[in-house]
Amino acid sequence: MEFLKTVRRRSFLSEVVYVGLNIALAVAVVILIKVTESPWPAIGLVLLSKWRVFAVRPRYWFVNIQSNLVDFIVSVSFVVFLYTLYSAVLSSGQALFVMTSLTILYIGWLLFLKPRSKRSYMVAQAGVALFVGVAALYLLAYAIPMTIVVLMMWLIGYTTARHILSSYSEETHVLFMSQLWAITLAEIGWLAYHWTVGYALLGIEGVILPRVALTVICIGFITLKCYDAYYHHKKIRSSDIVLPVLFTFGIIIVLPIILNLIGISVPVGI
């Protein structure tokens, strides 16, 4: 009985430490960006927080890096969002509201979504990484060479596809299908690089949503539904994808109109 009490006490303490460290990481990233006015120290802190990736034998490093890329994409995107926020000319009230909202969302990612391993959660993790990763990339795309943007889109595509396929216990065609989605995203990235439009959310010009992020998450949703239907039924039935396709195209067509009404359509990076 004493042993069980000790184990329970240690488990509770470890949970408290885990929660505290993750909250501290999010707050430290905000402080670093505010103090240094540069994203690089914050990105360095994010990399330092991944020390456990290399706390194994070198032959496992590559596997661990692949497994942690989704979290890394989300974390770096959080840094980019904060950096662009501080670079924008915002009132103190607007900046505090957006900064607090982003920090709470990032803490939610670290504490509630990232640790989950059920398929639905892993799909959600990949979806978040896809959306925020592309959005963050295209907030900076105007200052980055096209080749780098295309390569980053390829990496985001490969990482998110592999993350989802691993939840389906897909073994035979993981590499092929991940590469296929990565190439698709790279092509979209090349097209979007030449014409990138964003929406100033809530009327705040420093808070911009690139249209390409909305486009790829919708295409990704349809692709996932097609794969899920084939995985369970060995064929893609029209009944499995009609509603997702209608819903997705409704978002692609209707949401930009709504965003134009409540916000401002602007070229990203200008």
Image (cartoon, rainbow, N blue to C red):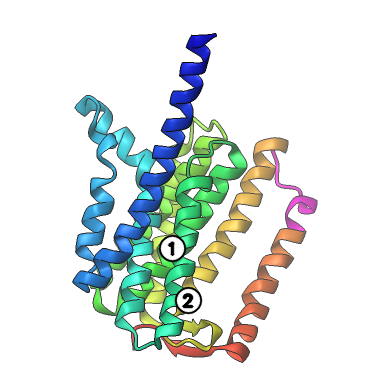
Q: Which residues are magenta?
A: 234-242
CA gap between label 1 and label 2 equals 10 Å
Say left or right for 245 vs 176.
right
* Location of residue 249 by image quarter: bottom right
Front residue of 253/55: it is 55
Q: Quadrant of the C terminus?
A: bottom left
Amino acid at the residue labelled 2? Phe
User: Quick check: 210 above or below 49?
Assistant: below
User: Quick check: 194 above or below 76?
Assistant: below
Q: Is residue 84 visible?
A: yes
User: Quick check: 221 above or below 85?
Assistant: above
- At x 20%, y 63%, the residue is 40
Classify mark 2: helix, strand or loop. helix
* Location of residue 155 by image quarter: bottom left
The residue indicated by pointer 1 is 103
Amino acid at the residue labelled 1? Thr
- At x 49%, y 60%, the residue is 105
